[in-house]
């Protein structure tokens, strides 16, 4: 597999998961900086034409 150009590393494709969901992968560098872990709960919000993903707080 070839290495992506620096400006192309954050371009991702949407993937169908099941019948009613769509998934997108998050670059590992971002996940590590946020110190997120597998199966961690997050909150997904829509603001205008943007999607915001943030850590879930009890």
Image: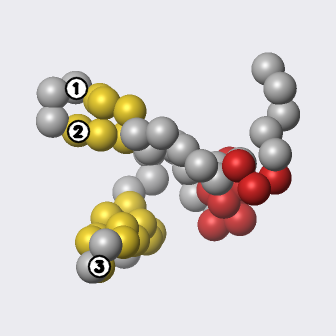
Q: Residue at x 38, y 33 (%)?
A: 15
Q: Nearer the viewer, residue 55 or 29?
A: 29
> With 8 as the anchor, is 11 left or right in this view?
left
Give percent across and percent down for residue 9.
71, 48
Q: Which residue is mark 3?
A: 47
Please determine whether, in this image, residue 29 is positioned above or below residue 13: below
Q: Which residue is mark 2?
A: 21
Q: Which residue is found at the position 27% from the left and 79% from the top?
A: 48
Q: Are marks 2 and 3 in contact (CB under 8 Å)?
A: no
Q: Earlier in the sequence, mark 2 or mark 3?
A: 2
Label 1: few (<14), some (14–19) or many (≥20) C-alpha neighbours in 10 Å:
few
Q: CA distance from mark 1 to mark 3?
A: 25 Å
Q: Pinpoint residue 55: horizontal percent, then vertical percent.
A: 44, 69
Q: Which quadrant would the N terminus be assigned to in this image?
A: top right
Dividing the picture into quarters, in which one does residue 56 lie? Answer: bottom left
Are the residues tagged 2 and 1 within 8 Å (C-beta)?
A: yes
């Amino acid at each position: 597999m070839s290495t992506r150009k620096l400006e192309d590393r954050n371009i991702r494709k949407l993937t169908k998961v099941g019948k009613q969901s769509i998934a997108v992968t998050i670059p590992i560098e971002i996940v590590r900086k946020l110190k997120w872990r597998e199966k961690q709960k997050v909150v997904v919000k829509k603001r205008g034409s943007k999607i915001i993903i943030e850590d879930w707080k009890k």
